[in-house]
Structures are given as structure tokens and as C-alpha cells.
Image: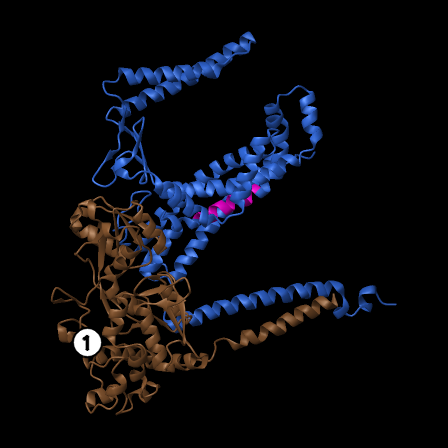
Amino acid sequence: MRKKILAVGLVILLVLPLLSSGQGQPATTLGKVQARGKLICGVNNAVPGFGFVDPQGNYSGFDVDYCKALAVAIFNDPTKVEYRPVTAASRFPALQSGEIDVLIRNTTWTLDRDVGLPFNFAPTTFYDGQGFMVRKASRINTLRDLNGATICVLQGTTTEQNLADMARRLGITIKPLVFNDVNARDQAYDQGRCDAMTADASGLAAARVKLSKPDDHKILPELISKEPLGPVVRHGDDQWFDIVKWTAFCTMEAEELEVTSKNVAQLKASQDPRIRRLLGLEGDFGKKLGLDNAWCANVIEKVGNYGEIYDRNVKPLGLERIVDGKPSPNASWTDGGLIYSPPFR
Amino acid sequence: MSTASARIPFWRDVRVLRVSAQLLFVLVIVLIANWFYTNLQINLERTGIRFGFDFLWTTAGFDISEGIPFEPTDSYGYAFWVGVVNTLRVIGIGIVLATLVGLVAGIARLSSNWLVRQIAAVYIETIRNTPLVVQLFFWYTAVLLKLPRVDESIELPGPIYLSQRGLALPRPYATESFPWWGVVLAVGLLAALAVYIGRRISLARAQRPGFPALWAGGVFVLCAVGGWLVLPQAPLAWEIPTLGRFNFEGGWQLSPEFAALLAGLVVYTGAFIAEIVRGGILAVPKGQTEAARALGLRPLQVLRLVVIPQALRVIVPPLTSQYLNLAKNSSLAVAVGYPDLFNVANTIINQSGRAIEMVFLIMATYLTMSLLTSAFMNWYNRRVKLVER
């Protein structure tokens, strides 16, 4: 009996401090990241070209490179990132709860997510749109041809809603088959269970590479939605939001000023004030962000400018920035695209 | 001399100590619960998340591939209900089939035939020892999706079409003359009832055994067939599935997603039930079987009349757990694209961002279904239990 009472007392003693402590110390995200010694980045692990993990556990892709860019901006070391693969469904709770510092996982910027969920969206790094992949032999050429078709779709995205909206707009019926796993969706489409597959055009291009006969499939030219993709952070930490935002702009400004990972070392001798400010040789923008003044120079040197990041990851999928002389939204604004950075001054 | 209780100080009185220990324990639990609750409140406030169920009445805006009729313009709440019905469908059919599979496999494992025994053992041990989600993927991608493409589907008499898009069957539908046939059926039912009562009375008078139910059944069938022939138009017609541009349209459709989930759940749960059945049968003393055989009962009769009624008492409680497992495992449907309640709820979470509310709803729904199942099984258990006088 006495032992039991002792045990109960001990439990209470152990529990009481927990009760009183309540919330932890509020710290800035940057402070937490620096104290931890690494950035925790929520990424995709199944979309080649954007966020993909190989059998050896190495992450690569466009979004992954932006995780690296952030790590370089903070630590000047692209390896100081812990990649947390998140699913479409788990990404928002993961960001909300603070499990990840930043979400860079082909996430569409929408009003509801920006306002309804307590998130801030950093500049769009990739302008995507929802499209359809069909078999070349299927005689489907336009969206209307999809009437009555079964369509494989991934859960947890705006794709499901866009699909239903399109069907209502065109007055056609479609049967969505909803999977929560990319590989299950691809399998079902590949084996013929679905007549079409819908996703962001970038995702379709990535999925096509993995099909058993990629050349038997085509992506319809019509897109049914605007999907601006970019990094996402939590509300309530403006400094962190600024860091994520301006790290993305840094890569875009570098491309505009033709600073690349190859020539950045020489350009440190440049007399162009725009380049000097970008590389942190003049002004102390880095300090104001809570970083080193050479943060942007480091990002360009270790990760590259926007064009380099794009060409390394997205170009191999067959998505060009300029198609037949016509700029896609992902071309630089100087070429007629939408990739545009506010001035570094 | 004072009384016994007066001599023992209260802090050493066992009764007081017991009660206070219990009170303390309750207090700790309440404090922990309160801590969780306030923590949730603080965090919700801090992150600016609203809590409430009013979003359930807003437009869903997505479509659901199968189940009761649903339009994208219907509400989130109704979408969730479609998912619940789909879940109940797979659970209901799954429980019945899993019980049958389990019963057969369990008895087969005790068979005196070596081959039957070995086959049952291999089935049970392989299935019980591999994860269910892997089996679901197997059924879906390696079995059902390997069926012929929809434009090369297998045609069975009926016509029934089998392809990787599922099974398409003819469906009976009511024509204009169906109400009249309904009237005929009602009349037939009344006539059958009258015949049944009349036969029973006359048989009782003559003190002779007979088959009044057979007579009544005959009358009813006669009325039904007669009505069908007399009416100018057949009351029921068949809607034949036809191949449209992409899929079969019309008729009854059984999707491969449903079939994969059902097959996976039935085969998996059946293996567990088989072991429970085997245990139940082995728990009946051998003397019972021997005595029944000695009385001249045939093997099937021994099983049906002597062994199974006694084995049921051992079988039913663990069987209930298996039913509950099947119900909860049905939430793996999303792996094979079947729109069960978990699948639909996930879509709702993604679109509305109301994770806490939806998770709460999901838990409440599964809890309700499980509690109802277990209430029913407890009632059944009391019925088959040995009545002690």
C-alpha cells in the first residue's frame, strides 16, 4: 500500500511541472533553425524534377534546390537541411504545427490557403497549370473529348476541385478515381484503369517519365487552372517570411543580372552597383535579414541562379521556358515571362 | 478502551487510503485532460484556426466515383455521408463473406483429409503473416488491373462483362405495369396467408402432419407467375450494360476498387476467423464428438448439431474483435482508390483545411459503428451462451 501511495505521489510530482510549464518559449524561426544547426524543409519525394528521393536517399529537384538555397543563406552550407517528405494531406498540419520550418512542395498559392489557413506565400518560383495526360491512341484531343472518361487524380490537392469545376463548366460528366499515393495513381493509369490522368503539367511531365511506355502518352495543350507554386511559411514571423521571400528573389535577380554560379567569384570585383548590392559588397541587406551580408552571393555560388536551377531540374522533363520563340510564364520578364524580382536596393 | 477505528489514525486506515488513492488518481486524470484541452485552445487561438462544423453545409465542389447519387454541388456533409454509406457497404458484405470464408477454412484445417488440411494451413499462415495494405495492392494492381482492357472485355452469358474497369451486369428495372404486378403480388400474399392458416387448421383437425408452408408458397408463386403472364407488358425489364466511349454505361457496375478492398478484407479477416473457429472447435471435448458419432449422427450432423453450438460460445467473443478489425481496416480503402468515408474525409480536409473537425468526425463515426457492432455481438453472445439454471 505504502509503495502504491509513493508511486502515485511520484507520478503527481512528475506531472505537475508539465502542467505549469504550458507553452514553450516563443523564439523566432531563424533563431530556432540556427540553434538546431539545420533547416527542416517539407518536400515532395515522388515528383522527379521537383522533389524526388533516389534509392540512396538523396533528394534532388527544383523545390529541393530552394531548400538548399535557404540553407546556404542561413548556414552557407547546402547540406544543412533535413528533408521531411510530406504528403499533400499532411503538409499543412506539418507547417502549422511547426514540424517543418518551410514548405517547398509544389504548393499552389490560393486565397483560401493564404487567408483561411494561417500561411504566407513567398514569391512564385514556378507557374504551373493543371492539365491532362492521355494515351495517344485514345483520340482525346480536347477537354470536351473527356466526356464520360474515368480520370485518375491524386488526393489532397486543388486538382480534384478544378476537375469538378471544369466538368460543370463544360457540362460533361467525368468519373474521378481518387488515390492518396502517387505510385498507386500512376499504376492505375499506366495499366489502363483510367482514360486520363490529371495533375499540374509539371507533375504530369514527371509522371510520364515513370510510365512503362512514356512515348505512348501525351499531355493535352489546354490547361484548366492557374497553379502558382512557391515556398510557404507560417503566419507570425515576418523576419522568416522575408528571408524565404528574398532568397527566392535573389536567384531571380541573379539571373537578370547574369550572375551565375560560375562567374560569381569574378563578379565580386564588378563595379556595377546593382551586382555589388546583390552580392552584399555594398549595403547591409543581409544583416537586416538577420543573415550574413554575403548570403545571396553564397546562394548563387553554391546553388545557382534561377535559370541554372530550372535548367538543372525542370528542363530534362521536357518543359522549356521558351517554346517555339513564345515565352512560358516561367521565362524571365526580360524575355516576356513572369519571373521578376523587385530591385535589390 | 476506545473502539477499533479510533485506535487506527486515519492516515493508516486502509479504507481511507484506498478511497483517497482513487480520488487522487481521478484528479490526476482530470488535470491531464484539462491540460490537453487548454493546450488545444491556446494553440488554436495562437495559430488562428477557427473551430466549428458550419463548413459541412458549404458546397463540396468535388465528385465521388461511386456510391449513392452525388453531385459536386452537394455539401461537404452529404459527401461525407456518401463515404459513410460506401464504408457500411463494404463492411456489411465483408463481415458476412469473411465469416463464411473463416468457417470453411477453420473447419478445413481440422479436416481428416491431408490435402484439405494443408491447403487451409498454407492459406491461413500466408495471409495472417503479411500486411493487409500489401495484400490490397496485390489484389488491385496484380489481379484486378491485369484483367483485359475495357474494349476487350470478357463477355459472360447474361450478358455480363468483365474487364479491368470492373464487372457490368444487367439490372432489372420496373416498367409501367410494375404497380399492377405489385397489386397482384399483394393479393397473392394474402391468398397464401389464407391458404396457410386454412391448411394448418384442417391438418390440426385431422391430426396429421403436413406441409402448410409449401402449399402457401405454391399459391404465391402461382399468383406471381400468373400476374406476369396476364399483364400486357412484363413488369420488370433488364437494363443491359453497353460500352460507351470509355466505360460501360447502364446496368449494375461493380468497380475493381470495391472488389479489391472487399477481397482484401475478406481474405485477410477470414484467415483470422479460421483460427478462431479452429480454436473453438478444439475447445469442445473430444468425448462430445465421439458420443455424437456413437449415437449414429453423420459427420455433418455432428458438426451442425453438437460441435458448432458448443464451439460458438468460445468463438463469438474473439469473433467480435475480428469484425471490429475488419470495420477499421476498411479505412485502407484510399490505397486502392475506393471512396470510403476516410478517403472522402481526407479530400474534405484538403479542400476546407478543417482537419481537427474532420478527424473528430471520422473518429466519432468509426466509434459509433464499432460500438453498434460490438453491442450486437454482445447481445448474440448472451443468446448462445450456456444457460445456467
Task: Identify which residue, B279 or A294, lies in the foreground.
Answer: A294
Give the residue type at disc 1: Tyr
Left or right side of A18 for A344: left
The kind of secondary structure element at disc 1 is loop
Q: Which colour denotes chain A?
A: brown
Q: Which residue is mark 1?
A: A340
Determine whether B195 is above or below A64 in the image: above
Residue sitting at x 32%, y 72%: A65
Left or right side of A286 for B302: right
Residue sitting at x 11%, y 67%: A325
Q: Quadrant of residue B171?
A: top left
| Residue B328 picture location, percent across and down | 47, 49
Q: Is residue B178 one of those drawn in magenta?
A: no
Q: Which colour denotes chain B?
A: blue
Q: Which residues are magenta?
A: B319-330
| Residue B99 picture location, percent across and down | 51, 37
Question: Looking at the image, which residue sits at the far top?
Answer: B206
Residue sitting at x 55%, y 45%: B321
| Residue B323 picture location, percent across and down | 51, 43
Left or right side of A164 for B331: right
Q: Main secondary structure of the magenta part?
A: helix
Q: Is residue B130 visible?
A: yes
Q: Residues within 10 Å of mark 1 (few under 14, many from 20)?
A: some
Determine whether B214 is above or below B323 in the image: above
Q: Is residue A232 visible?
A: no
The chain ID associated with circle 1 is A
Q: Is residue B323 one of those drawn in magenta?
A: yes
| Residue B249 picture location, percent across and down | 25, 37
